Image: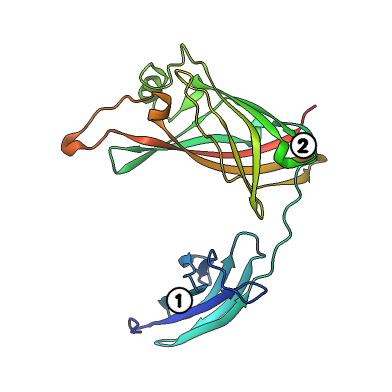
Amino acid sequence: MSVPPGAGFVSCRVLDPVNEPVRGAEFAVSDAMGRTVVSGGADPFGSFVAAVPAGDYRLAVTAEGYTPYRGSASVGDSAHSSLGDVMLQVAQPPALPDAGDWEIEPMHSSVGFTARHIGLARIHGRFNTFAGALRIAERVEQSAMHVVIDASSIDTNVKMRDDHLRSADFLDVDHFPTLEFYSERFVHKGGSRWAITGALPARCDAYGHARRGVPGSGQRHGGETRAACRATTELHRDDFTVNWQTMLARGIAAVGSSVTIELDIQIVPKS
């Protein structure tokens, strides 16, 4: 392969402990100042190749369920620096929260969302007021949770837009003051990933799947036990009869039809 003047190649292949390629591996190549120069994922054979300016680099390799790998490489002008086969070791899964009743700790939690705007930008927002309880069962798969969000606490940092979102065109907070999520189904997806499927009653009693891909672990912090998890999902407005829309020139919708929900949650044992 040809390479631009003053650059070279860095590469490696990622394998698991039985010498099978790790297809989900992610790479980050950083310079001496710690700045990421290039990043990306492995190909179907677990390989990664990138052209970088000649110099010294650090390479970080991560994959779900494996211990991260870090190495170094010195890339010469028009040269190829290969780390060869990198074998990732299976990581110990994080400790799960103890069985019992837990509650969301709002001071260290966030409920955010992202929506498409005029077909080329994204609007970011959050709900400032929410609460939730979890009952962790001896078999985590039999756990349950209930989350309540104050719909009027929506905040996109623009008052006029927030007032519109609270109106009958969207959340209709006068008739539906809360958004509530119920779940009694936790499914282990491998490693530290879990899927939580439940019901989200909103507007006209429509229901939808509301959370998935939930990693978590329990730790002691400041003398108390707490657990943390991150979660993402995508909701479609039409499923909840939130179908207000206006079209711009060339048929571009002012507001996208789907909303991405992002949660960063800490929980503590219920007092």
Which mark sits nearer the N-terminus, 2 or 1? Answer: 1
Name which residue type carries label 1: Val
Q: Residues within 10 Å of mark 1 (few under 14, many from 20)?
A: some
User: Which element carries disc 2, helix, strand or loop?
Assistant: loop
Residue at 34% across / 25% down in the picture? Answer: 243
Residue at 33% across / 42% down in the picture? Answer: 121
As drawn, is 199 to the left or to the right of 66?
left
Name which residue type carries label 2: Ala
**Which residue is at the front of the view, 157 or 194?**
194
Q: Is residue 40 visible?
A: yes
- Residue 66, relative to residue 162: is it above or below? below
Q: Position of residue 209 (x, y in %)?
A: 52, 34
As drawn, is 134 to the left or to the right of 126?
right
Residue at 63% across / 70% down in the picture? Answer: 69
Quarter of the image with the N terminus in it: bottom left
Q: State the separation of the CA atoms marked 2 and 1.
A: 45 Å
User: Which element carries disc 1, helix, strand or loop?
Assistant: strand
User: Which residue lies most toward the right here?
Assistant: 223
Q: Position of residue 237 (x, y in %)?
A: 40, 30
Q: Position of residue 102 (x, y in %)?
A: 74, 32
Q: Position of residue 177 (x, y in %)?
A: 51, 16
Contact, mark 2 vs mark 1 (Cβ under 8 Å):
no
User: Which residue lies most toward the top here?
Assistant: 174
Residue at 50% across / 84% down in the picture? Answer: 81
**Which residue is at the front of the view, 57 or 257?**
257
User: Which residue lies most toward the left here?
Assistant: 250
User: What residue does disc 1 label?
Assistant: 49
User: What residue does disc 2 label?
Assistant: 137
